[in-house]
Image (tube, rainbow, N blue to C red):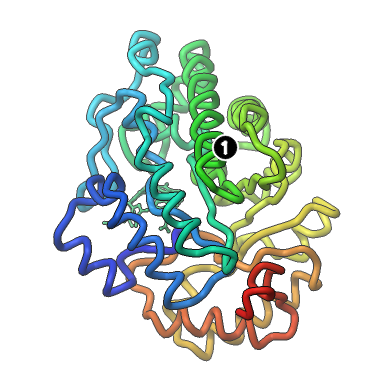
Amino acid sequence: MRQAGRYLPEYREVRRRVSFLDLCRDVDLAAEVSLQPFRRFSPDGVIFFSDILVPVQAMGARVEFGKEGPRLTHPVRTGDDVLRLRRFDPAGELRFTGEILKRLRGEVGDRAAVIGFAGAPWTLACYLIEGGGSKSFAAIKEMMGLGQRTLEGLLNLLADVVGDVLSFQIASGAQAVQIFDTWAGELTREDYRRWALPATVRAIAGIRRSDQPVILYANGCSHILEAMNESGADVLSVDWRIPLSEARRRVPGRPLQGNLDPGILLGGTGEVRRRVRAMLAETGGLSHVVNLGHGVLPQTPVESAEAFFASVRSSGVAETTDAAAEAGA
Ligand code: CP3
C-alpha cells in the first residue's frame, strides 16, 4: 500500500519545493521520500516512490496531478485513441525508476525487501478511459458493451506494458512486485472474469522473474477472491471489507496480505492496538503479510502509524523476515 505521502511532515516539506510528477522523476528526492517511512517505522518492505500513472504517461497519455487527484486530459474513447498509445522500452523511458530501485537496494541492504509496483491493466484502463477517478465508471462500462474490440485492444496493450515495466523493476533490484487493481471491485464477478482477470493473467505471465513474488491487490475484492486466485499471483492482498478468516477459507493455502481499514488509524492509538490484535488473531498465524487494506490517508496521525507497527511487533504472532532477523532488526 502507499507508505510515503502527505501524512508525513517530512514528505510535505519535500512537496513544498517540487510537483508530484517531478518528484517521481527525481532520483535523489524519490529515493529520499521512499526512505522516510523506512527510517521512522523499519517495515520489512520498502515500496519505491512512483505512481501507477507514470508508465501511462510514458505510453503517450497526458497526465496531470491536481488537487482532485490525477487527470488525463485526452480520454481514450476510440480504436484510433488506442493506436496513439505505445508499448515502450522501460530501460529508455523509465530509466529513473530503475535508478531509484538500485539506490534503495544500496541504502536498505538486507534490512528490508524493496518492492516494485504497477497498476493492473483494468485500473489503468479506467483512468485512461474515464480521464481520472470516477464514481460510475460510465465511459468504460459503455465500452464493455459497445466498444468491446477497442477495450480488448487497450487491455492487451496495458497488460504487455505492465509485464515490461515490472520485468524492468525486477532487473533493477525489486525483490517483490505488487499489482494494484484499485477499481476491480467495481465489476461484477462475471465481468471481472471477462475483462480484468485475463489482462492480469497476461501481465503476470509477461513478467521476467526468478523467485520474486507477485502480489495482487484489489480494492473491494470480496466477490472476486476465487477469480483473483487464478491470476498467477503468489500473494493476494485484500481490503478490509472481507474478514481474513473468510478469505483464508476461500483460497486455502494462498499467502494473504492486508487488511486493516486505513480509517482505523484516524480513531486514536488505543483503537489501533485493539484492531491490530483482532486482525492478527484472524490470520491464524499462517503465511500472512501484515498490512493495511488500502493506502494511508493523508489525515493520519504519525503516532497511529507508530502504534500499528508497535502492536504488530509486540503481538508474538508476528515474525520478522529472515533478512531482518539476521540484520538484528
Ligand atoms: O508509498 C509509496 O511511497 C509508493 C507510492 C505510490 C503512490 N501511488 C504515490 C502517490 C503508490 C504505490 C501509488 C499507487 C497508486 N496511485 C494507486 C493504486 C493504489 C491505490 O491507492 O489505490 C492509484 C489508484 C494511484 C493514482 C493516484 N495517485 C491517485 C488516485 C492519487 C491522488 C490521491 C490523493 O491522495 O490525492 C495519486 C497521487 C499520489 N500518488 C500521492 C502519492 C504519495 C499523493 C500526491 C501528493 O503528494 O499530493
Badge 1 density bin: few <14, some 14–19, many ≥20, Cα 10 Å? some
Vertical position of residue 164 compared to residue 103: above or below: above
Q: Give the residue displayed 40% in from the left and 10% down from the top.
A: 79
As drawn, the residue found furthest toward the bottom would be 270
Residue 227 left/right relative to 298: right
Q: Position of residue 315 (x, y in %)?
A: 69, 85
Q: Give the residue displayed 71% in from the left and 77% down from the top.
A: 318
Q: Position of residue 131 (x, y in %)?
A: 31, 32
Q: Position of residue 29 (x, y in %)?
A: 28, 57
Amino acid residing under circle 1 = Leu
Q: Secondary structure at mark 1?
A: loop
Vertical position of residue 148 compared to residue 229: above or below: above
Q: Give the residue displayed 54% in from the left and 26% down from the top.
A: 159
Q: Is residue 186 visible?
A: no
Residue under numbered circle 1: 187
**Quarter-of-image position of residue 267:** bottom left
